[in-house]
């Protein structure tokens, strides 16, 4: 039994080490790499030199949970547990999966918070502190050369219809994360970030006008430098457009809701078709990055300048409806391209998947149930080859003995079906001679007591056998019969079963206690190893 407990301890330890640590190492160790190291295009001979590319890690839709997330009481235990494990997953993702790639730039594509526009200043500040802790932003700003850029999402500032009533939401966002519309350069590639929540707003509105003014100013500087358009809300695509092999959920079609009075945007899945075409024609990007959808989607847009690929990234959180969270590695070229047709090679991308946390927890639950069943039902003497072999040999011996017993019984029956005749020799000795005789159809009990076959028993023998018979009859009368014996036997059986159940429960509890004593401290160590600031 102790060997079984030790084996289960090892199984649990290996499971926890993988689910809580090794699974997050897989992207950097095995499944993912910088795209410029994989790129095989013959059009660029310099890709073998890693210094020719700047490394950018792209993250979308963390949506740090708050009181608006799960319709739970804000300070309830269930809410706190959900927030902790959601934050922990994303912190492990950034520390163990993203940062080991040593990116030069980290780019957030919006929806940093879940209920940003609805939060009070105190609640928003609490979510901001958690956001910084999850993604280790304070340490990155102090001890790292990594640059971090942010894009506003609808869960951060709301849609255009919301802005007219709560301008302070945008003010606090810009105070912490900077301008909503801006341009920055990585290597020899320009990145253009726009506030997609306002771009489809009323044309006379201040926010929509500011976004369009920015787009027009940027469009005047179009040259040979490749451009990447950053928008939280994806550009328009026809309904049921195929999203590629990496999408796990159903396709989401366009939906736009407007306020009745102001006609401002209340909600939209994609930028409108007209606005999308304007952006493609005015900015002429070689690549578009977006979020908002929470699932992976790769589409190709047609503009008058050619085809443009858009990558919609899935969420980095495991609690936002996507079983397969992800992030993206992007390589931006440090080389200047004089041929516009080759400018797309200036930006290379690689989608990387994080552990499927939901399935990891399902496996924990399954292993817990299996552990209880094994400890409860495992034979007391264990299971081994020698025991199986010994049991088989015992069965064979029993089978052989059964055959011989049947043969002996057959010979005995043959003896009973014979007639014996007493013969005296010259010296006065008696001999019994067997004669074949058909078995009588019915033999009386009295005759059976005084005769065997046709052999005659002397009177003294008859008397002695009669006394023995009477004694046996009187003895049989004294044997308890009926329900009393059955009740006693049943009581003993139930008592034995109860003892066996209690012994197994105690054994199960003892084994489970040992397994927990070994693995609970390991689990707690793995939890807080990643949670504390580094």
Image (cartoon, rainbow, N blue to C red):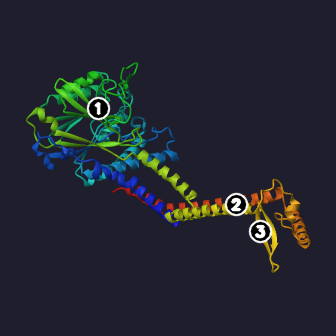
- Badge number at residue 257: none
Can you see residue 358?
A: yes
Closer to us: 409 or 369: 409
**Where does the C terminus fall, quadrant-wise?**
bottom left
457 horizontally vs 370: left or right: right
Q: Which callout, 3 or 1, points to the residue nearer the camera? A: 3
What x and y, as percent, mark residue 461?
88, 72
Going by the picture, which residue comes out furthest to the front?
426
C-alpha separation, residue under disc 2 versus residue under disc 1: 100 Å
C-alpha separation, residue under disc 2 versus residue under disc 3: 20 Å
Where is residue 321, by image quadrant?
A: top left
- In the image, residue 513 sits, relative to residue 30, either above or below, namely below
Residue receiving disc 1: 195
What x and y, as percent, mark residue 339?
9, 34
- Badge number at residue 433: 3
Q: Evaluate if marks 2 and 3 touch, with contact meaning CB atoms under 8 Å apart.
A: no
Q: Residue at left 82%, top 55%?
A: 483
- In the image, residue 272 sits, relative to residue 41, either above or below, namely above
464 horizontally vs 347: left or right: right
The secondary element bearing badge 3 is classed as strand
Residue receiving disc 2: 410
Q: Evaluate if marks 2 and 1 touch, with contact meaning CB atoms under 8 Å apart.
A: no
User: Which tag, 2 or 1, sits closer to the chain's start?
Assistant: 1
What x and y, as percent, mark residue 413?
74, 60
User: Which tag, 2 or 3, sits closer to the chain's start?
Assistant: 2
Q: Residue at left 19%, top 47%?
A: 37
C-alpha separation, residue under disc 3 versus residue under disc 1: 120 Å
- In the image, residue 122 sits, relative to residue 466, either above or below, namely above
């Amino acid at each position: 039994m102790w060997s079984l407990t030790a084996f289960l301890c090892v199984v649990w330890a290996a499971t926890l080490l993988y689910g809580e640590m090794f699974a997050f190492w897989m992207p950097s160790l095995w499944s993912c790499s910088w795209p410029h190291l994989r790129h095989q295009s013959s059009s660029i001979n310099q890709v073998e030199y890693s210094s020719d590319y700047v490394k950018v890690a792209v993250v979308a839709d963390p949506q740090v949970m708050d009181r608006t997330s799960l319709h739970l009481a804000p300070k309830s235990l269930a809410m706190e547990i959900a927030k902790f494990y959601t934050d922990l997953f994303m912190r492990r993702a950034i520390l163990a999966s993203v940062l080991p790639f040593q990116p030069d730039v980290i780019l957030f594509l919006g929806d940093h918070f879940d209920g940003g526009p609805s939060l009070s200043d105190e609640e928003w500040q609490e979510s901001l502190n958690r956001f910084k802790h999850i993604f280790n932003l304070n340490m990155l700003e102090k001890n790292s050369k990594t640059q971090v850029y942010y894009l506003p999402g609808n869960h951060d500032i709301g849609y255009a219809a919301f802005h007219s009533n709560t301008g302070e939401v945008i003010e606090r966002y810009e105070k912490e994360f900077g301008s909503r519309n801006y341009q920055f350069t990585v290597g020899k590639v320009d990145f253009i970030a726009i506030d997609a929540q306002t771009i489809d707003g009323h044309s006379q509105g201040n926010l929509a006008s500011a976004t369009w003014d920015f787009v027009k100013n940027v469009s005047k500087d179009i040259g040979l430098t490749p451009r990447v358009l950053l928008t939280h809300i994806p550009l328009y695509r026809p309904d049921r457009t195929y999203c590629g092999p990496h999408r796990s959920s159903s396709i989401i079609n366009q939906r736009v809701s407007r306020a009745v009075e102001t006609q401002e945007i209340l909600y939209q899945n994609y930028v409108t078709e007209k606005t999308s075409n304007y952006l493609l024609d005015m900015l002429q990007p070689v690549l578009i990055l977006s979020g908002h959808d929470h699932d992976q989607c790769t589409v190709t847009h047609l503009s008058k300048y050619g085809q443009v690929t858009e990558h919609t990234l899935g969420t980095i959180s495991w609690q936002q409806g996507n079983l397969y969270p992800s992030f993206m590695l992007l390589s931006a070229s440090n080389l200047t391209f004089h041929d516009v047709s080759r400018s797309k090679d200036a930006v290379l991308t690689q989608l990387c998947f994080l552990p499927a946390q939901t399935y990891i927890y399902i496996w924990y639950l399954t292993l817990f149930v299996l552990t209880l069943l094994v400890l409860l039902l495992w034979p007391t003497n264990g299971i081994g080859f020698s025991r199986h072999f010994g049991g088989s040999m015992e069965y064979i011996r029993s089978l052989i003995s059964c055959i011989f017993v049947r043969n002996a019984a057959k010979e005995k029956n043959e003896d009973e079906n014979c007639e014996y005749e007493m013969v005296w020799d010259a010296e006065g000795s008696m001999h019994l001679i067997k004669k074949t005789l058909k078995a009588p159809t019915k033999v009386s009990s009295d005759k059976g007591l005084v005769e065997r076959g046709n052999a005659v028993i002397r009177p003294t023998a008859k008397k002695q056998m009669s006394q023995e018979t009477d004694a046996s009859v009187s003895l049989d009368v004294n044997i308890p019969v009926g329900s009393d014996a059955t009740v006693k036997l049943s009581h003993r059986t139930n008592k034995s079963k109860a003892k066996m159940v209690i012994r197994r429960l105690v054994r199960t509890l003892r084994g489970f206690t040992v397994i927990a004593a070994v693995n609970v401290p390991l689990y707690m160590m793995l939890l807080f190893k990643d949670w504390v600031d580094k």
